[in-house]
DNA sequence: ACGTAAGCGAGACGGTACGTCGAGTCTTGGT
DNA sequence: ACCAAGACTCGACGTACCGTCTCGCTTACGT
């Protein structure tokens, strides 16, 4: 999401002038994340503090990101673990894998991102961009899994994938965000959620049982 | 959550001096909410702007709330509609009613609150307080409904109420927060979620049927 | 030259709100002058340094002066000694008194002002204002003395007061500005200049002698 | 005052490598002067602006001048017209010629220089250098003229050349620096000053006339 | 003809200071 | 004891230049 050093269609040639320092870029991201956890929140992240900790001029930060929010987003995006590889056999197992990836339990910093981009924020433009690059790809994968389940009969044929997605992803994130900073999600919470959702809450589960 | 005009054991008598202006208090809350929606975000809410718009001195605000966050929480708490009265007959209907109340669809401002208090925030202390006063009471009601359902056989006996709560509340809020500012939740989303959750996602719903 | 706390025709009543701190104002001016001499130049005067040394917020400075230059001018204007009282008997003695006042020898800081406001500067507006408040009044006094001399016969009747002013004031300031920072004007330089100017440089002094 | 491309005793041979571009040097000086007048002040002269306007890299400037001040001095030194050729007959005429040269009326940019180097400045070192190369040579010429006048009887024998110099040069520069940017010195101001100074201000001019 | 040494435009680098904004506190006179 | 107004200190914001440092390229000589 950082400002790209544009080439303007001039072909593959390097742009003129001194190239940007990769070292600086890394140091800035690192410093940002450090401050996020150390200061326990977005409020503690100051461009000036980031610059100082990364031993970098403020200019060098602003050359890459237009403002503080954008920097934080980018920093958090690097935290968001990769989309997990799915076994592709059992739909249930794939859903559990995805649910687990919502919150890689080892990194509590990730949660911040959800506080910054919910609905109304200071920078709706960036929120949109964040959704594009981080949220949507994951949703797409889950949607595919759900469709596969519907197609191969593992899931009900009349299931609305959007509702199902909201249920699984929503349950995990909601639970994650109600944790204290020191707590952590129970190891098997993703499993529980997926199993419970698959089975259904009601004792009857009528429709599918009342089949002929 | 506002600072109460303390009595400190001085008996039941009115505190001395001029009483606080109710008019000012209302104007402040109103101004805060106006700014929240008008500026489309927490960032646009400035104590100075609130004071100006409410035609009130900054002092008058700080006399009542210790800081900006507290004011915003309080303002949002007034938005959060009351806990709905439940018919108490069908567990399914009660759950739908609660799910609907998560997001009184007429007021998009409500969403902000979830952005402010997720996990790591600037003021964990206030987040905790917010949870106490706003979130927990609602959870308690839902938990009661779920327990009732388990007890009377409408829901599976082995259901974990926490997981169920995460599923229903999570699905609705997750969906709400992925809306554009102008969109709104589909009228019957809460119904869909509850019905889907009750029924289960899987086609088999085996476990409960295969009981001896 | 500072920004006045305007009353806008509201009569003699005090403006509302907390009044500006005289203590702060004095401290700011003092700090500015200290830095001017200590750092030996305008370049060493930083708003941030002034604020720090005066134990004052930057805002408090900017509330009173629109920018750095204006502050420095005002600070220097306080240095510029008052217009001396003139005996009013001998024109020669009055001119010497005025010439001496151009540069109150005890204060080398004064010179800076001339470096800031000569002709072309960053802030022509302020330069004009400075001329109005500081330079013109002094010129007026000297002009009056010269006119008196022309009228009462002490000076030539065909003398152009502007030229005479340029000669006397110019000679002193030029000499002053070519001093090293540690040097000082010779005690009696003003006397020498006035006497030399009165007498004339030429040995003949013809015109006035060759009169009939 | 520019940094010379040093030879270090290697004889008369050209230094190796690509020689410096004269075109760049000229463009830099031109750009500097343009900015000086266009922005009406030293403050508007930015190395970056100069580089941009001269279509030159900043490096190319810094290779030649150690800093901004030095560049400006050098630029202004090119403006300062050459020391005029003096007829050498009438002392009065020579003084007028020199007085005129103080401010070649066609170029208002020249004045700036006096604003930069008066007494206390940012770079006393450079001010000294400027005096050495620009001011002193002119003073020397004027001093010689004055001495010649004293010797050949055109000027009073007891005249102090320093005082006389201050009077003539001071009068012209003082008058010049009190001009608006659009005004210009009256054509014959130098003449007036010299004549007035020679004649003396006083009506009596006694001393030289009352000689035996 | 070709290598080598220095110049060139461009632009990123670490800094310092700018002038602005807002937070939360303090101080007036008036209700 | 309250109120509005507005000044107070403090600290971060995002911008502009400074003077330095690479980049890849372009001269011009001395082999």
Image (cartoon, coloured by chain):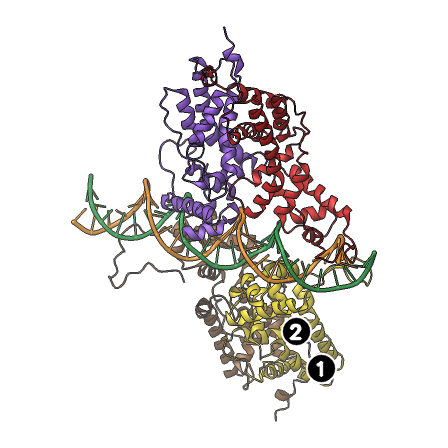
Chain colours: A purple, B red, C yellow, D brown, E green, F orange
Q: Position of residue C117 (x, y in %)?
A: 60, 64
- Secondary structure of the residue carrying tag 1 is loop
Residue placed under numbered mark 2 in the picture: C165
User: Compared to A154, does A7 lie above or below?
Assistant: below
Q: How crowded is mark 2: few (under 14 residues within 10 Å), some or many (20 or more)?
A: many
Q: Position of residue B169 (x, y in %)?
A: 56, 30
What is the quadrant of residue D173 in the picture?
A: bottom right
Q: Do pointers 1 and 2 mark residues of a single chain?
A: yes
- Quarter of the image with the C terminus of chain D in it: bottom right
What is the quadrant of residue D166 in the picture?
A: bottom right
Q: Which of marks 1 and 2 is in front?
A: 1
Q: Nearer the viewer, residue B208 or A35?
A: B208
User: Compared to A189, does C90 lie above or below?
Assistant: below
- Quick check: can you spot residue B35? no
Query: Residue drawn at (49%, 60%), measured in percent from left and top?
Result: D76
What chain is tagged by disc 1?
C
Query: Residue drawn at (65%, 76%), measured in percent from left and top?
Result: C81
Residue at the farthest bottom position: D212
Disc 1 to disc 2, C-alpha distance:
17 Å
What chain is tagged by disc 2?
C
Q: How crowded is mark 1: few (under 14 residues within 10 Å), some or many (20 or more)?
A: some
Residue placed under numbered mark 1 in the picture: C86
Q: Where is residue C97 in the image (x, y as percent from the top left)?
A: 66, 81
- Secondary structure of the residue carrying tag 2 is helix
Query: Residue drawn at (50%, 33%), measured in percent from left and top?
Result: A173
- Quick check: can you spot residue D128? yes
Disc with the residue nearer the chain's start (1 vs 2): 1
Q: Where is residue C188 in the image (x, y as percent from the top left)?
A: 58, 85
Q: Nearer the viewer, residue A126 or D154?
A: A126
Q: Nearer the viewer, residue C137 or A167?
A: A167
Left or right of A83? Residue C98 is: right
């Amino acid at each position: 999401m950082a400002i790209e050093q544009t080439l303007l269609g001039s072909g593959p040639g390097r742009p003129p002038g001194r190239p940007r320092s990769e070292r600086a870029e890394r140091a800035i991201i690192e410093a940002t994340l450090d401050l996020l956890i150390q200061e326990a929140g977005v409020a503690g992240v100051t461009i000036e503090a980031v610059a100082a900790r990364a031993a970098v001029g403020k200019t060098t930060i602003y050359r890459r990101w237009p403002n503080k929010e954008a920097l934080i987003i980018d920093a958090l995006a690097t935290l968001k673990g990769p989309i997990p590889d799915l076994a592709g056999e059992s739909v249930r197992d794939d859903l559990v894998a995805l649910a687990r990836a919502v919150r890689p339990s080892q990194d509590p910093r990730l949660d911040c991102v959800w506080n910054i981009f919910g609905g109304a924020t200071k920078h709706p433009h960036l929120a949109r961009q964040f959704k594009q690059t981080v949220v949507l790809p994951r949703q797409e994968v889950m949607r595919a899994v759900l469709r596969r389940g519907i197609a191969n009969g593992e899931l009900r044929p009349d299931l609305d994938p959007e509702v199902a997605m909201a249920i699984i992803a929503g349950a995990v994130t909601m639970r994650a965000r109600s944790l204290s900073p020191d707590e952590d999600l129970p190891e098997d919470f993703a499993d529980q959620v997926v199993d419970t959702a698959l089975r259904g809450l009601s004792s009857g589960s009528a429709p599918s049982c009342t089949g002929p």
